[in-house]
Image: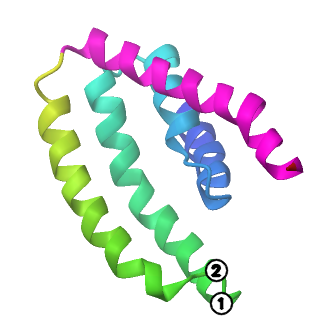
Amino acid sequence: MIFILLGFLAGIIGGMGIGGGTILIPALTLLTDVSQHQAQGLNLLSFIPAALVASITYFKNRNIEFSLLLPLIISGIIGAVCGSLFAVHLSSSLLRKLFGVFLIGIGLYELLWKEKSRTS
């Protein structure tokens, strides 16, 4: 039951464009016996169908800038290869800490600097 609830919450967050991994990865590592590497792999695989559904919805609502699509896809693939090759060589403990630092950094950015740029 926990996996269904986590998948549902990750799907909602992912569909909003935030990234379901921000919910799914910490929840899997804290609430189950899944390792950090497994949680990140599960997140990536569960992301594919959720991203497909969200992409269709955004496409129908004309919220995709096609001129940016190809550069983002190409650089995203290159980044994914580099990141996954790097991640498999890290210990699960270090990978978890790095992911935590990343989430804290994103949270601080959203709280402190993002709001200032909107009001300027």
Determine whether 47 is above or below 114 in the image: below
Q: Residue at x 58, y 34 (%)?
A: 23
Can you identify the residue that label 2 sits on?
A: 57
Rounded to the nearest whole Å, what is the CA distance between mark 1 and mark 2?
5 Å
Q: How many marks?
A: 2
Check residue 30 for magenta coloring: no
- Kindly report the secondary structure that dominates the magenta region of the rendered protein: helix
Residue furthest to the front = 120
Which three-letter amino acid code belongs to the residue tagged 2?
A: Thr
Q: Residue at x 25, y 15 (%)?
A: 92
Label 2 Cα neighbours within 10 Å, binned few <14 / some 14-19 / many ≥20:
few
Task: Give the magenta-colored segment's residue range.
Answer: 91-119
Determine whether 90 is above or below 50 in the image: above
Q: Is the Cβ of the residue at disc 1 closer than 8 Å to that at disc 2?
A: yes
Is 98 left or right of 86, judged from the image as shown? right
Nearer the observer, 25 or 77 = 77
Q: Secondary structure at mark 2?
A: helix
* Picture coordinates of residue 107, whole percent (x, y): 65, 29
Residue furthest to the top = 93
Check residue 103 for magenta coloring: yes
* Picture coordinates of residue 53, whole percent (x, y): 55, 73
Q: Secondary structure at mark 1?
A: helix
Quadrant of the snapshot with the N terminus: top right
Determine whether 53 is above or below 23 in the image: below
Can you identify the residue that label 1 sits on?
A: 60
Q: Residue at x 48, y 19 (%)?
A: 100
Label 1 Cα neighbours within 10 Å, binned few <14 / some 14-19 / many ≥20:
few
* Picture coordinates of residue 16, whole percent (x, y): 68, 58
